[in-house]
Image (cartoon, rainbow, N blue to C red):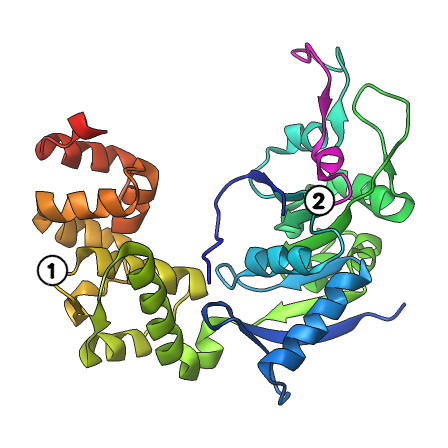
Amino acid sequence: MRSLFSGDVISIERYSSMKEFPVDIEFYLEAIHFAGLSLDKEKTRHLLERLAKSDKNILILGETGTGKDVLARKIHAWSERKEGPFVAINCASIPADLFEAELFGFSKGAFTGAYQEKAGLLEMAEKGTAFLDEIGELPFSLQAKLLRVIENRTFRRLGEVRERYCQARFIFATNKDLKTAVKTGQFRQDLYYRLSPVQIHLDPLRFHLNLLPRLIHSIIEKENRSQGFNKKISAEALQKLMTYAFPGNIRELINILERAMLLSEDDLIRAEDIQFDNNFFQENGLRNLSADRLRVVLEACRWNKTEAARKIGTSRRHLYRLLQKYNLDCLI
């Protein structure tokens, strides 16, 4: 069981009629359920593996934090393309004026500063999977060019006239209502219908609060194994979690539990260790954070400052101040 959530703009890894399948994903139990259908874990996995092996484009819909990127990676791992690269592209994080160059690449001299040629992300995907996350944020001016790639499987680098062939399989994801975006003219209708013959809908966590206790215990067990802890959660802390709506979904739940486990003073996670609002935590929890507890966090994160700051819900700048305060900055 792994947490694969990433905030990177780009990451590259190795390893007819539109049908809609409503899906709820229970990542940390390795169970995927089709909402409203009595399908067990193995039947559901088999259905998704069939989709993975079909080599058709897939569109994954769901709120932020529901695990769209996790499912995309799973589909890639189950597909015949698993030996190829998995190229993840966050459409919301690339400036519009750079997007075409990043996606398609460019030739030397194509624009000011293009001192050498550069392959685009579609080329880097080779015969693997190109995952375009937040596809709803793709600038309208570029939607026609992406449509052309999907339809013809060809593209041109900026500054070139030679056609290049796109060999990658596409997986798309968004937290936007694309049907509404089509109606308001923000998203091309022809592109919407080309994105996928299959849509997978990921439910928000609040739709399945009955799964929370199992998810919570599973995440805690995973973190115990990973960090060498022996943490348990109190009934009060569990009840506090059960009354929360989790706007950040599974990703938020994971962050809350990881932070609570790192900062709890002993092997019991209490209600006061569960903090939902990072600002509240920064103003109150960090004020009383001891040097020993901060060191535990840093060691658990292998002294990665960015990860440590995320775990305790603060900025890197604030973390630096804490390191200086406790004379820990010399250890990094």
Against 98, residue 140 (above or below) is below
Verify CB contact (< 8 Å) between mark 2 and mark 1.
no
307 displayed left or right of 39? left
Q: Nearer the viewer, mark 2 or mark 1?
A: 2
User: What residue is rendered at 48% in x and 45% in y?
Assistant: 7
Quarter location, residue 38: bottom right
- Tally of marks: 2
First in sequence, mark 2 or 1: give its number. 2
Let me know if residue 307 is in the magenta part. Answer: no
Q: Which numbered tag is attached to residue 50?
A: none
Task: Please state the horizontal and vertical placement of residue 111, each as a whole percent of the image.
Answer: 72, 14
Bounds of the magenta span?
112-128
In the rendered structure, the answer to whether residue 109 lies left or right of residue 94 reads right
Q: Which residue is mark 1?
A: 265
What residue type is disc 1 on? Glu
Could you say where residue 236 lies in the image, as x and y percent from the top left? 19, 79
Q: Is residue 256 visible?
A: no
Q: Quadrant of the C terminus?
A: top left
User: Camera-side residue: 15 or 150?
Assistant: 15
| Location of mark 2 (residue) | 84
Q: Nearer the viewer, residue 157 or 119?
A: 119
Residue 88, image x and y in percent? 62, 44
Q: Secondary structure at mark 1?
A: loop
